[in-house]
Image: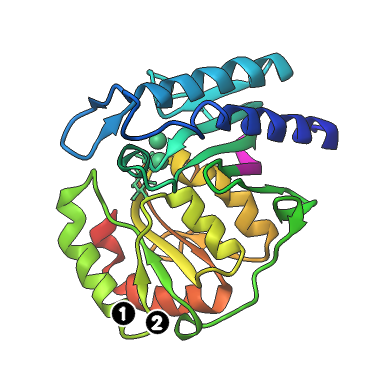
């Protein structure tokens, strides 16, 4: 098992990776935006730069580890054996391109197919969320824990499906049903941070009809260690694979959401 010291070294490497993007100005800098297919599926040179930096530095720290990363042909790595770093170098690329300053570097650490730690860092707000199995969840080194709450006690962040237009009707129908049960809906365009916002009580739950493993791997242990739950829209445990619906947050709000989503869960598979 990784030592506490090694976990803190991982955190420091992610902080340092944040320096690669925190001062990028959306107007004066060429982000070198490329399409990965479709108008919303884009990548910038910074996505690749951050991923390469993390692979190099984390690889030096843990030479036996494997890497699964969203970019540059690293997305098919088997997560079942040994240590695997699951990296979304910039979660919220569209926010990054549009200058929202609401994006995150997200790194999940899996051991033999099970997530044991996660780090989600928004360098633009200097907010570092992390969670380590058995050691708690933190925001900027201060412990965080979820106060159980109902949907009506807070907002729900409901993710859009930019890469899956075929899911839009079902997603809008479900989100409409949710509006009658909650204070209000939000969509921030950065799944990993939204899950962390549930972990620190900024929302009741985050729900996304379709995510890839790198979108939620970093936040998984943070929510768990904060006392929350994660599952898919049918209530089944989250599988460590891409293309799943993801619901995470306070237990009571989550079970209320499931009352609504279970009826239509097969539409999101
Ligand atoms: C996206 C964001 C967004 C979510 C999408 C993700 P990316 O990640 O997390 O909030 O709705 O499903 O793909 O492409 O910006 O890394
Ligand atoms: Ca992402
Ligand atoms: Ca990304």
Please state the horizontal and vertical placement of residue 122, each as a whole percent of the image: 54, 44
Q: Is residue 44 above or below residue 174?
A: above
Q: Is residue 190 left or right of residue 174?
A: right
User: Which image quadrant is residue 123 in?
Assistant: top right
Which residue is identified by label 2? 182
- Residue 182 visible to the viewer: yes
Q: Which residues are magenta?
A: 113-119
Which residue is identified by label 1? 179
Asked if marks 1 and 2 touch (Cβ < 8 Å), the reply is yes
Snapshot colouring: rainbow
Our reading of the magenta stretch's main secondary structure is: strand
Mark 1 secondary-structure assignment: helix
Neighbor class of circle 2 (other Cα within 10 Å; few <14, some 14-19, many 20+) is: some
Does the magenta portion include 115? yes
Please state the horizontal and vertical placement of residue 234, each as a whole percent of the image: 39, 65
Mark 2 secondary-structure assignment: loop
Please state the horizontal and vertical placement of residue 225, each as a whole percent of the image: 69, 57
Residue at x-position 36% and y-position 78%: 184
Q: Is residue 179 above or below residue 133?
A: below
Residue at x-position 45% and y-position 63%: 206
- Residue 63 visible to the viewer: no
| Image mark for residue 123 | none
């Amino acid at each position: 098992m990784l030592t506490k010291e090694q976990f803190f070294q991982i955190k420091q490497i992610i902080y340092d990776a944040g320096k690669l993007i925190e001062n990028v100005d959306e107007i004066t800098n060429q982000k070198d935006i490329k399409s990965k297919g479709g108008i919303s599926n884009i990548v910038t040179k910074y996505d690749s730069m951050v991923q390469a930096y993390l692979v190099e530095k984390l690889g030096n720290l843990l030479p036996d580890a494997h890497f699964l990363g969203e970019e540059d042909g690293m997305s098919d790595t088997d997560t079942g054996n040994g240590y695997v770093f699951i990296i979304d170098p910039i979660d919220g690329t569209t926010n990054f391109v549009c200058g929202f300053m609401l994006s995150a570097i997200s790194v999940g650490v899996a051991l033999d197919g099970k997530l044991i730690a996660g780090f989600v860092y928004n360098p633009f707000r200097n907010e570092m969320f992390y969670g380590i199995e058995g050691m708690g969840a933190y925001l900027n080194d201060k412990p965080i824990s979820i106060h159980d709450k109902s949907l009506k006690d807070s907002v729900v962040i409901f993710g859009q499906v930019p890469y899956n237009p075929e899911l839009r009707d079902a997603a809008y129908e479900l989100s409409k049903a949710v509006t009658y049960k909650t204070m209000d809906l939000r969509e921030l365009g950065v799944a990993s941070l939204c899950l962390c916002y549930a972990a620190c009580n900024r929302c009741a739950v985050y729900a996304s009809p379709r995510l890839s493993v790198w979108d939620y791997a970093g936040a998984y242990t943070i929510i768990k260690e904060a006392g929350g739950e994660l599952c898919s829209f049918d209530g089944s445990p989250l599988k460590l694979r891409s293309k799943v619906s993801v619901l995470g947050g306070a237990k009571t709000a989550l079970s209320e959401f499931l009352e609504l989503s279970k009826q239509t869960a097969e539409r999101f598979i």
